[in-house]
Amino acid sequence: MFFEDVTVALGEMLRVVKPGGTVALAVWGDRAANPFFSIVTEVLARYLPSPPEDPDAPGAFRFAEPGKLAALLSQAGAAGVREQVVDFHIEAAMTPAEFWQLRSEISDSLRAKVARLTEGELVQVVREVSERLQPFSSAGHLRMPAPSLR
């Protein structure tokens, strides 16, 4: 997802795998189906509009479209390429407030956006994120769907 030149990266992976060996990759599925990412992004977009992302630029959802990475692997010379959706959940013993803290600490781009908010906007964003997390929260525990492709 994060390689600048995916063709070169895939070629190197295939070059170093033993003959008859396997390369296994996993990437995030649809952003909208991944609330770990989508909730914060959607709330912030109401306060800080962003230009559309380049779908081929390095990023977490670069290969979320089914078949996109599989096609590149085939073009790079991989044989027997298979892809499937893996439905799993991100689970953590944390509150929505702790989720916000985690997300805002692990993302450089999120920190940069948060720095552009007024104090009042930040309070509102945190409140809205917390509200949007409620369907995934129970007794200090979060459980969110996180589909991926492998």
Image: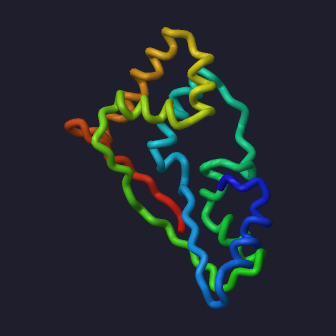
- Total marks shown come to 0
x and y percent of residue 131 in the render?
Answer: 36, 28
Q: Is residue 137 left or right of residue 118?
A: left
Q: Is residue 119 left or right of residue 21?
A: left
Which residue: 48% across, 50% down? 33
- Give the answer, above or below, for where 75 lies relative to 79: above
Q: Residue furthest left?
A: 139
Which residue: 44% across, 15% down? 123
x and y percent of residue 144 in the render?
Answer: 37, 47
Q: Is residue 93 left or right of residue 114?
A: left
Given residues 29 and 18, the one toward you in this image is: 18
- Give the answer, above or below, for where 57 lies relative to 100: below
x and y percent of residue 65 in the render?
Answer: 63, 59
Q: Quadrant of the N terminus?
A: bottom right
Q: Residue furthest bottom?
A: 20
- Give the answer, above or below, for where 38 lies relative to 29: above
Quadrant hosting residue 70: bottom right
Color style of the picture: rainbow
Q: Quadrant of the C terminus?
A: bottom right
Which residue: 55% across, 64% down? 26
Given residues 38 and 118, the one toward you in this image is: 118
Which residue: 36% across, 31% down? 98
Quadrant hosting residue 113: top right
x and y percent of residue 124 in the render?
Answer: 45, 16
Given residues 34 and 11, the one toward you in this image is: 11
- Give the answer, above or below, for where 130 lies relative to 77: above
